[in-house]
Image (cartoon, rainbow, N blue to C red):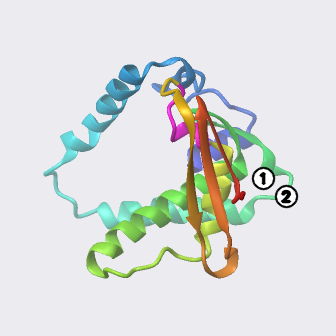
Amino acid sequence: FTLRITRGLQGDTSPPEGLPSPHIWKTLSQEERRQRAMRLAQGPIARRGRPRNDLLSGFSHAWDQFHHLLVTLTAHEWHTPCYQGRGILPVHSLAHAGIFELAIHSWDIRSALEPFAPLAPDTLAAMLDFFSACPHWFFLHDARLPTPIRYRFAFTGALSREWDIVVEGHQAQIGPAAE
């Protein structure tokens, strides 16, 4: 996330070396997307079993850099376009995608140790922004549905309201819950 935001701030929305055009995602079939995901999974699988002495150090260093970058952004920079593998996004959506990744994986680890571990409340707004910017990433465009499906999420705390993701045909939208 840090590299892609930094490149975007420098006016570069092209894919980093070795990564595809963000537009390819819209043209791939479901099988091609599955094959691409399998190829991407090969890196972590190949690294399995290697010494992990520096795993926590590397993780902390990367997220410290991400945090430092975010706190230095100006209001104008927050809307700068950046490359993301599935499209061009403004900095705020890419930043929120990073926060989402960190929050959801942190929760995933904690939930194995603490069965009732909640998501960090401050991350919910970032998650909503991320999903609002890219619901089509989570619902494949060639999986056309004959009737709309509504997924309703009820948030408590600061965002205390219900949100709907509606998938209709090959479109997905998110917004406050409707009747």
Is 140 contained in the magenta span? yes
Q: Which residues are magenta?
A: 135-141
Residue 132, can we see it? yes
> Circle 1 sits on which residue?
78
Is 42 contained in the magenta span? no
Mark 1 lies on a secondary structure that is: helix
User: Total of numbered circles in the picture?
Assistant: 2
Specify the label residue 168 is tagged with: none
43 sits to left or right of 155: left
Residue 157 at x, y percent in the picture: 63, 81
Q: Is residue 86 above or below residue 76?
A: above
Which part of the image, by quadrant, shows the C terminus? Answer: bottom right
> Circle 2 sits on which residue?
75
Alpha carbon distance from label 2 to label 1: 5 Å
The residue type indicated by label 2 comes to Ala
- The residue located at (58%, 27%) in the rendering is 22
Residue 120 at x, y percent in the picture: 53, 76
Q: Is residue 172 above or below residue 109?
A: above
Tell me if label 2 and label 1 are in contact, CB under 8 Å. yes
Residue 95, can we see it? no
Estimate how packed mark 2 is, as few (under 14), some (14 to 19) or many (20 or more) residues with alpha carbons within 10 Å. Answer: few
Asked which quadrant contains residue 29, the reply is top left
Residue 91 at x, y percent in the picture: 71, 48
Mark 2 lies on a secondary structure that is: loop
